[in-house]
Image (cartoon, coloured by chain):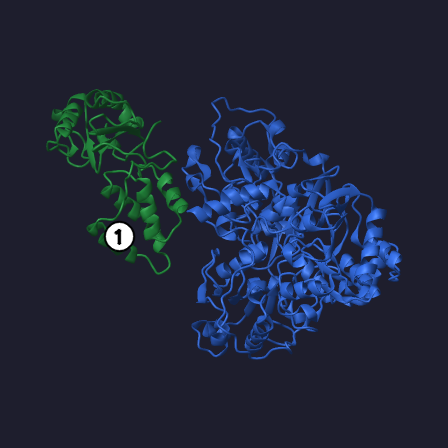
Chain colours: A blue, B green
Amino acid sequence: MPTITIDDKKVEFENGMTVMQACELAGAEIPRFCYHEKLSIAGNCRMCLVEMEKGPPKPVASCAMPAGDGMVIKTDSEMVKKARKGVMEFLLINHPLDCPICDQGGECDLQDQALHYGFDKSRYEENKRAVKNKHMGPLVSTIMTRCIHCTRCVRFSTEVAGVDDLGLLGRGENAEITTYLEKTIDSELSGNVIDLCPVGALTSKPYSFKSRPWELTKTETFDVFDGVGSSIRVDTRGKQVLRVLPRINEDTNEEWISDKTRFAIDGLSRQRLDKVYIKENDKLNASDWDSALNIIKDEINIRGKDKTITLSGKFTDAETIISSKLFSKGLGSNFYDCRFDNAQIIHGENESYKFNSSIQEVENADAILLVGSNPRWEASVLNARIRKAFIHNNCQVGLIGPALDLNYAYKEISVSLNGLNEILDNKSEFSKVLFNAKNPIIIVGTSAINTSEGSSVLKTCAEIARKLPNYSESFNPLNILNQDISRVGSLELGFVNKVFDGNFEKKLKEEIGLNKPVVFLLGLDELNPKSLEGSFVVYLGHHGDVNAQHADIILPSPAYTEKSSTFMNIEGRTIQTSRCHNPLGDAKEEWKIFRVLSDLLDCGIQFNNLNDVRKTLINENKNFLAILEANSSSNLSFSSKEDIKDQSLSYNISNFYMNDSISRASETMANCTNEILNKAKAS
Amino acid sequence: MKHPGMINKVFNLPDEIFDWSQDNFERASEIIKKYPNSRQQSAVIPLLDLAQRQNSGWLSKTAIEKVAETLSMSYIRVLEVATFYSMFNLEPVGENFVQICRTTPCWLRGSDKLVEVAKEVSNTKLGETSDDKKFTIVEVECLGACCNAPMVQINDDYYEDLDEHSFKKLLTNLKQSKETKKGSQIGRQTSHPQREDNA
């Protein structure tokens, strides 16, 4: 391995590293503005200057200089200090002194580095330049005079987000960052430019002037708005969630989060269910826990214990699933299910609902077959990986399903799902691409498997996956992309009933029509309320959304920031969220509710605290034991060639910004819908 | 300093739509062919120039968008290039785009006077276009003909060794759309030293 000497310390480095990366290996911190690990190298801020012995007689930009064997680098010599001070002085010439009113204040790279390299006074007597603010949409607010032209935002939007919207116009004194004709950034990852901006030029619009970073309680937790389970940090003040920031997690979200994850949080303080409600004369009245639970007990006894139905929703955690399952079992009922969107699975095969190849593997793919999936909306950060593969591996993407606005080129194979037959029979042009690729993968969206044909689609996709060259005992190229964080965990716990196979809503309606049972909705709002007619609906959840209004009893439960819960992301990676603040109002964790109900109805649930619940969870399924590890298998024993009929397919997300109870209550997301989606539709 | 090539905005005349003329479309295809496969976007500068020439000396919003569409680039990428180079004008300019050099050699040799003459003849201000659309007068930095200072560039041609008198004549001729003498106005061959008797 080549070696490099940094500040008299010899370190070995890998070929292809830059001097800056080598310096980091040696523990020398290099200040920077424009350089970012995940973006291309620009080398335009000049803050990372270091001295190179026997090199040019001037300092070199370490971020753009490839490290060479035997180089001698100094990072704290007089020359370096003087050069960096010079750069800083130039940067501060036009940067306004408005830190006291700047949202970035306290977490600003420029502020921090000016502490080390800034002069105590300015030698500049001319007029500072002023730049007009730009409109960039409902999420990003701009104060462009603060911009130091690092172009991180431009590189991010071009490279990662894949939307050529941002650019640097003009030159020198007149340079300014803008979007073409001040159009809104049309990306679901746009919020990340706020984190990337090293100064306060791009800041969060919903968070503007809300708080200072040192006033916030920071909790490291996980996101629940899509199946990826991105690592996030939630900043709270009291019982208010003020902002969400990404944490670095190379396994899932890298450094990005979607705009919904970041900005839907204002929905957490609107339309909240904070009290127990009981319906009397078609009106929901506030009540107390005891009366509500007693009514439920009576209703269950009257309507039949063993007929009780329990259905889970988008945000249902594994603790809730296991306690409601045990409760149902105690009642003698096995009418529980989590597949409200009718996504089919092959019973007993966990490969039929998991993202088997792992998210990280997506960026190594050189051919991807998308089956009825819009990854841009279903899992935005996963889509950024597909784009990465597209850019770096020249990955070929084929789509089975209606045309989509993806941020990479793709081949339209067929609109109907019967394109799968052609792929398998080598009749499609994309078959060659897929079967001759080195690392092909298949991504199946739930929109492709939500009909009664769903299981044959799954089987056929498995058959294709089995024939792929990289399929082996240790690598499974078949990926099912579930949209909800709750789904894989619920399926792992067997929260399904074969009764509902094929056509969930229809069979549910039949079941309800027949027995008129008590139905527990665990935060489920995606169901047509008409399907529930005749039953006694108990809604456990945190938002007064669609189905809560049709409930007979509402039991408030905490939202994802208010309790510690366990989920499995699409890969089957167990994640445990943390409680960021106390629940609002009278809300109680679901497992506690089922524990009390179990006592009332003699269902024999034993656990008394969260630890006990988790022990039960692990006893039920060992996969919940390994936190942050994805368990994978590769048998595909359900694969078979089925004849897929010519059937049309429509994507089941119609509005990325508002497709669950929290984001539907969010004002920011409503603004996004108006400004981004509706405008795009109109044009 | 006001200059139609140094603004960061796009401008469009009402109802103006730019499309390649048949000739220029063929020229554009020729230019694009010069670049290797998948590097066609490198043709952005020559194509912008072609569009500017077709569009009487400036690039309108639709012209920029046409270039972008021709090269399958996003609008913002083309606008970046068009705003970076001051030779691409983003506002309408007059028939004669007069660029008066004001860098030291020309300045010492009397470029200030040339500016006054230009203002007088065209009846307009620096950086602006005359009412009759004949002239746009701008000051620019060194155009690289210092030995024949003072000089101006009008559209594609250099006019060198000017003084108030000859420049006034030159502009009057241009105003009347008459033939003008290009290059040195005192009969100097390229940049030969000036003879005593000419002085």
Q: Name the residue under label 1.
A: B28
| A231 horizontally vs B164: left or right | right
Taking the view exactly as shown, the residue that stands out farthest to the front is A281
**Residue in the picture at 60% in, 48% down:** A260
In percent of width and height, residue A375 lies at: 55, 59
Looking at the picture, which amino acid does disc 1 mark? Ala
In percent of width and height, residue B15 lies at: 28, 39
Q: Residues within 10 Å of mark 1 (few under 14, many from 20)?
A: many
**Residue in the picture at 47% in, 31% down:** A131
In percent of width and height, residue A323 lies at: 80, 59
Please identify the quarter of the rendering in which residue A618 is found.
bottom right
Please identify the quarter of the rendering in which residue A176 is found.
top left
Q: In which quarter of the image is the N terminus of chain A?
A: bottom right
In percent of width and height, residue A344 lies at: 63, 68
Task: Inspect this view and state whether residue A530 appears.
Answer: yes
Towards the viewer: B107 or A657: A657
Q: For mark 1, name the chain.
A: B
**Residue in the picture at 38% in, 40% down:** B84
Towards the viewer: A534 or A296: A534
Q: Is mark 1 on a helix, strand or loop?
A: helix
